[in-house]
Every structure is written in C-alpha cells, then in structure tokens.
Amino acid sequence: MRPIGVFDSGVGGLTVVKELIRQLPNENIVYFGDTARVPYGIKSKETVIRFSIENILFLLKHDVKFICVACNTVSSFALPEIKHHFRVPIVGVITPGAREAVYATRNKRVGVIGTKGTIKSRAYENEIRQFDPAVKVTAIACPLFVPFVEEGWLGGEVVTSVVRYYLKPLKEAGVDTLILGCTHYPLLKSVIQEVMGKKVTLIDSAKQVAVEVQEILSNEGLLNKKGKARHEFFVSDNPEWFSNLARRFLGRPLRNVKKVTNV
Ligand code: DGL
C-alpha cells in the first residue's frame, strides 16, 4: 500500500493529518515536519520553494502516491512552482478552503487570517476571485498566533485581547465567513469564534483539504478501502519537542518520531 506523503514547516500540519486519519482511516501516511527550518511564515518565496522541493524529494524516497502540502505558507507561495517539477499529484490547502468559504458566505464578505507570508502572497484572494469575483476579501496576518499555540496558550485574557486586536478589521468589514488560513489556527477556534460571534462561519482549511484528498484519490482509483493503516513521522530536528506538541495537535502522543539529517 503506497502511502500519502504530507509535509509542513513543523508541527502544524498535524491538524491536517488528524483530518486525513479521520476521513481516510485506511491510508498509510508518511509525514515530514521541517522543524529545523520552521517557521516558513516569515521566509522569502525563493527559500520556501527551495525547502519545499527538498521536502518533496524526501517524501518521494518513501514511494508516496500523492502529496498533501499541509502548510498554508507553502501552498500560497510555492505550490504553482513546485507542481511543475514533479509527476506525483500534489494538493495544497488554499483551493479547498477558498472554495468552501465562497460556498458558505451569504453576504459575500470573507475574512482570511494567516502568516505574514500567506497574507502577502494574496493566494486566498486570487483563488476566491476565481470562484466568485463578487466576493470581497479582507485578509489579516496574525503572526503571534503560531507561538501562542506552540506555547499552549489557547485561551485566557492575554490571548483573547490579542485575538480581538487582530480581528478588529474583520469585524469592521462585516465578514460572515472567516478562513483559518494557517495550520495552527484550528487550535484557537473557540476564542476566535467567541471574538467574531456565533454567526460567523469559521472555515478550517485542514478539514477541507482532507475532503479534497479523498475525492482525488477516489477519482484516480488510488483510494485504500481496507487494511490497517501505518503512520510514520519524520522531522529535521527536535523529535522530542515535536512528540510533545503532537498530543495537542493530534489528540494523542506520538512515539517513534524519527529525525532525518539529510533532507
Ligand atoms: N504551517 C505554517 C502555515 O500553515 C505556519 C507555521 C510557519 O510559519 O511555518 O502557514
């Protein structure tokens, strides 16, 4: 059974893995987290493309049948370029999230939050425009959210006031739909929902990409319908840090995270 390859700049892609395991329980998965070079969100486009190509070459050594880019920054910056270099199907998180947001909005005002890189690339705006040019997009970078999540600050006074500060322009713009355009943000969902109000629909790009992977595998005849799945996790540094954080992202601890040195 050839595995699905998944990569992210670090630990955040585990929110995508969680959804993949839930929606595709029979698929083998090989995950690579580039913990030696995280964060990608503040790096240049050229650097993100170079790192991504190296990460894909690593996954290809594991004979993956499909690659899921579980990182919004990579999907925004690098996906169109890296797709040209490989024959293996590669899917990112932007298109599925954008499509779902266009479907969900009633007032055609959509918000996007993400890393500085993702917001600067305007990838979500461009994608949303393809689906419906009438939708107005307000996009805001929230660079403090990733460290909050990694430190386990998922609520409380300080986090709530920072969330309120970042999301103010989105409230003022009257968005009725908000894309959580970063792998870490689903962990801040409850405080974001509280600040935005119950009527705003939050789009979890991790959830949507798993739906898309399922569809593509099924259409290409690559879906595994039976058998016990094997999940392997590799990082470029600090496997202990990754294993500890995995509990929060995946809902269970991870043993056997392997460090690779030659990515
Ligand atoms: N995984 C990244 C993303 O989804 C966030 C972390 C980083 O900056 O590398 O954009």
Image: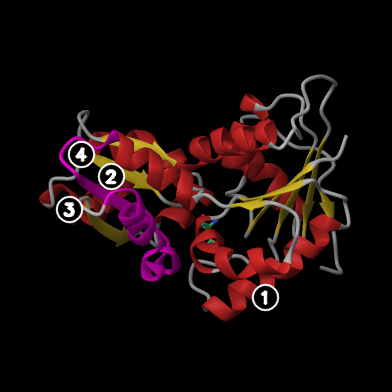
Q: Secondary structure at mark 3?
A: helix
Given this view, does label 4 or label 2 mark the residue nearer the observer?
Answer: 4
x then y, percent, for residue 237: 76, 62
Q: Amino acid at mark 2?
A: Thr
In this picture, residue 59 sits left or right of residue 127:
right
Q: Secondary structure at mark 4?
A: loop
Given this view, does label 3 or label 1 mark the residue nearer the observer?
Answer: 1
The residue segment tinted magenta is: 104-132
Taking the spot 49% from the left edge, 37% from the top edge, the residue there is 208
Given this view, does label 4 or label 3 mark the residue nearer the observer?
Answer: 4
Given this view, does label 3 or label 2 mark the residue nearer the observer?
Answer: 3
Q: Which residue is mark 3?
A: 168
Compared with 107, 224 (above or below) is above
Disc number at residue 83?
A: none
In this picture, residue 135 sits left or right of residue 6:
left
Query: Which quadrant is home to the C terminus?
Result: bottom right
The CA span between labels 2 and 1 is: 36 Å
* Mark 4: few/some/many CA within 10 Å (<14, 14-19, 20+): many
The foreground one among 245 and 112 is: 112
- The reply to whether residue 39 is visible in this rendering is no
Q: For residue 165, what is the image quadrant?
A: bottom left
Q: Amino acid at mark 3?
A: Lys
Q: For residue 4, what is the image quadrant?
A: top right
Q: Would you say the residues marked 3 and 1 are in contact, meaning their CB atoms lie under 8 Å apart?
A: no
